[in-house]
Image: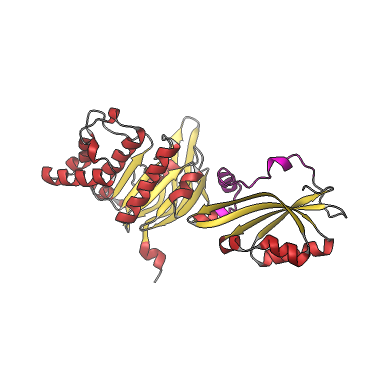
């Protein structure tokens, strides 16, 4: 039996969404397919206008797909009546960039609002609201109004409200875009905590790769209404295949040459007396291996380290190093072969007439 099929909480298949505008038809989504496993934090990243907000709104049918299938917990959302859809949406919470709190209601009353609409008893509402405010760390703010809260506190109220009806899925539409970096980190930590405690499936859309790196298990990159790349966050970050994904990754992981080399003119072939410039990328256990020492001892390479950095993604290391190498021509290829045998990515940037030491 297909394990993926068993554990999928959200399944989107060949979804399109078109609008009619003054300039003609606009295709916001062009045959999008993806699957989100139960208990996962799944990131969808793209630039403004890429279609990510339309996609997330198709999950709870705030936008009805033009064609295609959307299943949540095995239920085909596109076939539900309005009454059935209202019931199904109780299992799908949503938080927004601008919080969408009711300014005339207190924190407590904002969290209680969806439960009142669902016909919960007063005593049950009180218990549930207290549970949610404790979960998001706002038990001391019950009587305050949104205007009295910081941006981070407002988003915590939004999270508590979205979770009040015990949903199985939480949709986050640019939930941290209006927050400063420190507050963003605290909200992301809260979402991680909620994901662990409640086994809640979270779909998070963003234009910030740092958000994806912080908490997501899987990521899909959307551009012009198409999913251009998707997979585990570590794999997408360390080996992006599409140019747009590479641009996103480069915003938080330095893949460029150091400034001191940016203006250099490199030769394309080896000449006696040249130094070779190498960029080496290494992943996982390879970050622990003494590769530089091996190259120096075994192949008599003379090495200057020009740049080095290690990042951690989902707790796993990946690193980049730029080195200048002086060695005999024959020994250069031997060293390159060893590096590749060890699973490292090796790029010969070029050769320079004088050593860059």
Can residue 163 be seen by looking at this rendering? no
Q: Quadrant of the N terminus?
A: bottom left
Q: Is residue 345 above or below residue 307?
A: below
**Left or right: 145 as drawn, with respect to 8:** left
Image position of 264 with respect to 145: above or below: below
Residue 85 lies, in percent from the top left, at: 27, 47
- Residue nearest the viewer, comparing 56 with 306: 306
Query: x, y percentage for residue 317?
Result: 54, 57
Q: Per the image, is 254 magenta?
A: yes
| Residue plotted at (73% across, 65% down) | 337
- Give x and y (percent) for residue 201: 35, 54
Residue under the image location 36 percent in, 63 percent down:
7
Residue plotted at (25% across, 30% down): 145
Left or right placement of residue 339 versus residue 301 in this view: left
Could you tell whether 338 is left or right of 316 in the image? right
Taking the image as drawn, is residue 70 in sight?
Answer: yes
Q: Is residue 39 magenta?
A: no
**What segment is highlighted magenta in the picture?**
237-265
Residue most toward the right?
Answer: 272
Quadrant of the rendered image containing residue 72:
bottom left
Q: Which residue is more in the foreground, 338 or 175?
A: 338
* Most foreground residue, 20 or 186: 186
* Image side of residue 327 versus residue 289, left or right: right
């Amino acid at each position: 039996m297909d394990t993926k099929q068993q554990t999928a909480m959200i399944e989107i298949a060949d979804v399109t969404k078109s609008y009619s505008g003054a300039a003609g038809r606009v295709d916001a989504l062009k045959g999008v397919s993806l699957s989100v496993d139960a208990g996962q934090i799944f990131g969808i990243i793209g630039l403004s206008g890429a279609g990510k907000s339309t996609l997330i709104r198709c999950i709870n049918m705030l936008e009805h797909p033009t064609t295609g299938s959307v299943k949540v917990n095995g239920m085909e959302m596109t076939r539900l009546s309005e009454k059935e859809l209202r019931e199904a949406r109780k299992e799908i919470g949503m938080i927004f960039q601008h919080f969408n709190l009711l300014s005339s209601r207190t924190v407590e009353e904002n969290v209680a609002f969806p439960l009142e609409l669902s016909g919960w008893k007063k005593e049950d509402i009180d218990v549930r609201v207290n549970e949610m405010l404790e979960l998001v760390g706002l038990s001391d703010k019950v009587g305050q109004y949104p205007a009295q809260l910081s941006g981070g506190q407002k988003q915590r109220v939004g999270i508590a409200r979205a979770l009040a009806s015990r949903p199985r899925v939480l949709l986050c539409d640019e939930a941290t875009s209006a927050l400063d970096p420190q507050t963003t980190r605290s909200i992301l930590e809260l979402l991680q905590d909620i994901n662990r405690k409640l086994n809640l499936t979270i779909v998070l859309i963003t234009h910030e790769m740092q958000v994806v790196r912080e908490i997501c298990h899987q990521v899909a990159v959307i551009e012009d209404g198409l999913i251009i790349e998707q997979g585990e966050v570590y794999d997408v970050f360390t080996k992006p295949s599409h140019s747009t994904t590479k641009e996103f990754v480069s915003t938080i992981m330095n893949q460029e040459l150091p400034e001191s080399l940016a203006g250099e003119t490199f030769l394309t072939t080896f000449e006696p007396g040249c130094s070779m410039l190498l960029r080496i990328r290494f992943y996982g256990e390879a970050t622990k291996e003494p590769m530089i020492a091996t190259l120096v001892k075994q192949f008599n390479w003379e090495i200057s380290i020009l740049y080095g950095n290690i990042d951690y993604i989902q707790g796993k290391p990946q690193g980049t190093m730029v080195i200048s190498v002086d060695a005999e021509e024959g020994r250069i290829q031997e060293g390159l072969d060893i590096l590749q045998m060890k699973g490292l990515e090796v790029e010969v940037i070029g050769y320079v007439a004088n050593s860059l030491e």
